[in-house]
Amino acid sequence: MAHDHKPSRRRARVIAASVVTLALGWTVLAEIPVSAAGKPRGHDVSSHQKRVNWHKAKSKGARFVYIKATESYTYRNPHFKQQYNGSRKAGIIRGAYHFAAPNKSSGKKQAAYFMRHGGRWSADGRTLPPALDIEHNPYGKRKCYGVSKRGMVHWIKSFSKEVKRQTGRRPVIYTTTRWWNKCTGGSRAFGANHALWLARWSSTSGKLPKGWSYLTFWQYDNGGRLPGDQNLFNGSMKQLKRFARG
């Protein structure tokens, strides 16, 4: 994900190979080329992408998008309105995400801020559930933000509880297997009722974080035909619409 109001972290670019192996919740597909996977393709954007040509994105295959709305409890994406409303007008299913800063304030406070500034959800079939981007700290050496494993689990629960209270849905959790297992201690508290959005820029999705038996979204690359990071939905277009409706 992009962290767009401060210097972004240095990422090691991993070129996505042409073969993808997905461990699915409904079935298992092995060695399917990304270009022919038959799964809805999408992307995620932040203020780095600024004004996006959504009709062009759709013509290149975009069927869904997650858009950064907020970070911590003070930052708002200045391009959110154009990105969020424009993608819907182009016929792309879209949702909003929040970048977590667990060292800045409580999960409840950041969830409330997110809800006030774009994180709301409606069962219209065009809006994805809110997403929480929780990963290594891009602003310092403390990858877990200086928060204990128990404290991190509590923070995520607090965030999730507030989102559920305001929207009726649990947030999708975006993370990496390495970060999750390290910074939450491999918590299994979320897999049963939180959809997983896994970040792994590789030819395979690899091992899932502890607590999850399947993924819902897979961010497999940070460059390609669509603006922003590249993603696949783990199911059919019909299932994506059903997931959006809740």
Image (tube, helix red, strand yellow):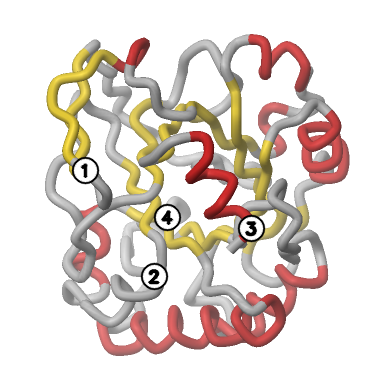
Q: The residue tagged with tag 3: helix, strand or loop? A: helix
- The foreground one among 162 and 139 is 162
Q: The residue tagged with tag 2: helix, strand or loop? A: loop
Name the amino acid, label 3.
Arg
- The foreground one among 146 and 40 is 40
Residue 64 spot, x, y in % from top left: 60, 35
Q: Tell me, yes or no, if residue 75 can be seen here.
A: no
Upstream in the sequence, badge 2 or badge 4? 2
The label shown at residue 27 is 1
Extreme residue toward the front, this view: 238
Residue 32 versus residue 6 in the image, above or below: above
Residue named by callout 2: 145
Residue 108 spot, x, y in % from top left: 61, 86
Residue named by callout 4: 174
**Disc 2 or disc 1, which is closer to the eye?**
1
Upstream in the sequence, badge 1 or badge 3? 1
**Tag 1 near tag 4, CB within 8 Å:** no
**Tag 3 near tag 4, CB within 8 Å:** no
- CA gap between label 3 and label 4 equals 20 Å
